[in-house]
Every structure is written in C-alpha cells, then in structure tokens.
Image (cartoon, rainbow, N blue to C red):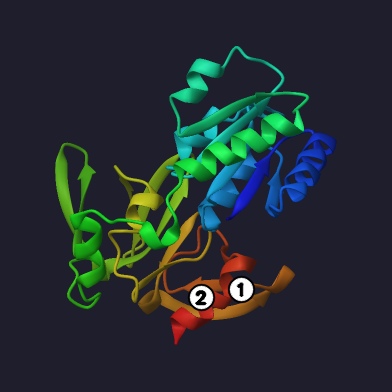
Amino acid sequence: MKVIIIEDEKPSARRLQRMLSHLNIETETMLHSVEESIQWFQNNEHPDLIFLDIQLSDGLSFEIFETINIKSAVIFTTAFDEYALQAFKLNSIDYLLKPIDEDDLAKAVKKYQERTPKKQAVTLDFNDIKKLLVNPIDREYKKRFSVKVGQHLKLINIDDIECFYSENKGTYLYTNEGRNYLLDTTLEQLEDELEPHTFFRINRKFFVNINAIKDMVSYTNSRLQIKLKTYNDDEVIVARERVKDFKAWLE
C-alpha cells in the first residue's frame, strides 16, 4: 500500500509517520504545502492513500484537488471540524481531529482496507479493458489541434508542433514557425491525447516533440537541458526524476 502524508507542521507529520509505522505502514513521502503537493502529483504515481491536513502553510489543501485529478483515498487530519462537509464531498475515508489518537488512526486505516478490494479482485469497466487490448500502434492520437486566431479557427498539424507548455495557468502549443497559441486544455489532458513515441513530458511544464530536439546538454542536479530547433523563450529542462525515463524514451 502506497501512503503519503501532506502536513505543513513537520513535527506532526513525523508523529503521524511513527504511528503509521506501528501499524506496519510505511510512508512513501511527506509533503508540506499546496504548491509542493501539486508538483509532486504532477510528476509521480499517485498513492493508494493520502493523510491530508486541511490548512496548509500556503492555503487549503482542497486547492490541490482543484488542480489535480486525484483518485487516491483520503483520510483528513486537522485541528478543526469546520471543513468536514467539504472533505466528505471528496474521496474521503475518515476525518481525524488532532491530536490524532492511535486507536482512531487504526480504525480509519481498517476502514480504508475494508473498503478497498484486493488487487487480485480489481475489476475494469469495458473502456479500461478495451484500452488494454488495443495495440498502442493502432490507437488513435490527436493529429491536429484547432486554435483561435481572432475570430477565426486555425488547424495546426501535430507534426508542426515543437512543444506544449503551461504558463500563467494557460496551456500553449509552439510551432516550428516560431508561433505559440493558447489551447483550451491542460497538460494532464494532453497526456492521453499525444502519441507517446513522439511527445514526452519532461517536467510539470513541458511536453517536447522528439523531432524538434536539436541538442541535449548536461545540467545542474543531474538534469538535462533540451535545445529545440525554434523554441528558445525559456529554458527547457528535464526534471531529475524524469531523466531516466527520458533517456529510455529517446531509444
């Protein structure tokens, strides 16, 4: 079972981690803010269960769910009960008030385990099964995007796009003609729409087209800097945790 803790008070996070270890549950990571959590979810496989404080240092943790589509189960941990109704509208298992009692924690974990089917018994709906059966080569990915230019719509072929990137809460495509266009989508949605042999998400901000890569240079902290044929508005950096997958993708 993959478990993470999101808690801005580090002593409370460590205490909860110790309590979970007494239940033979290892914590994969501990996050401490809304911003840090969003970045982590964008670059990592989502866990089975999240222990989530509601009031974090930079806002309410509900903001994470507004940005990321999180399907993990959640056990809320908070010193206040005023957010209980809002919490249970999400995929909430329980709502523990601080200071957390070990018996209450054990009951919450047991409740999660009883509600969660064994991995062998996981069932898929028809669309999930269909996705597993479809050969990736035969799967249909987007071949073009429509963008708005003034009062007109313009079609841009996928082969003419060097990269996709996010900036100021907007998502843009950049063409090999040196033009960028605003899209009505998110990078998360693009992950299911782009042909994976051609486009790779190098960090939380960028997808790059393999055919647009001009050069690759070693960068600080074991990262890579990508030079594209036309795009040079910002540094294009492969996140450290993505470097290994990126190199495998290149081959």
Examine the rendered structure and indicate whether residue 137 appears above or below residue 67: below
Residue 210 lies, in percent from the top left, at: 39, 76
Instruction: Name the residue rendered at 75%, 28% in the picture.
Output: 100
Residue 78 lies, in percent from the top left, at: 68, 24
User: Which residue does the numbered mark 1 point to in the structure image?
Assistant: 224
Q: Amino acid at mark 1?
A: Leu
- Say which quadrant the N terminus sits in: bottom right
Residue 81 occupies quadrant: top right
Local crowd size for mark 1, using a 10 Å CA cut-off: few (<14), some (14–19), many (≥20)? many
Mark 1 residue element: strand
Q: Nearer the viewer, residue 43 or 29?
A: 29
Examine the rendered structure and indicate whether residue 145 appears above or below residue 198: above
Examine the rendered structure and indicate whether residue 246 appears above or below residue 44: below
Q: Nearer the viewer, residue 196 or 134?
A: 134
Residue that lies at the very extreme toward the top in this rendered image: 82
Residue 104 occupies quadrant: top right
Judge depth for marks 1 and 2 and give the one in front: 2
Q: Is residue 38 left or right of residue 191?
A: right
- Say which quadrant the C terminus sits in: bottom left
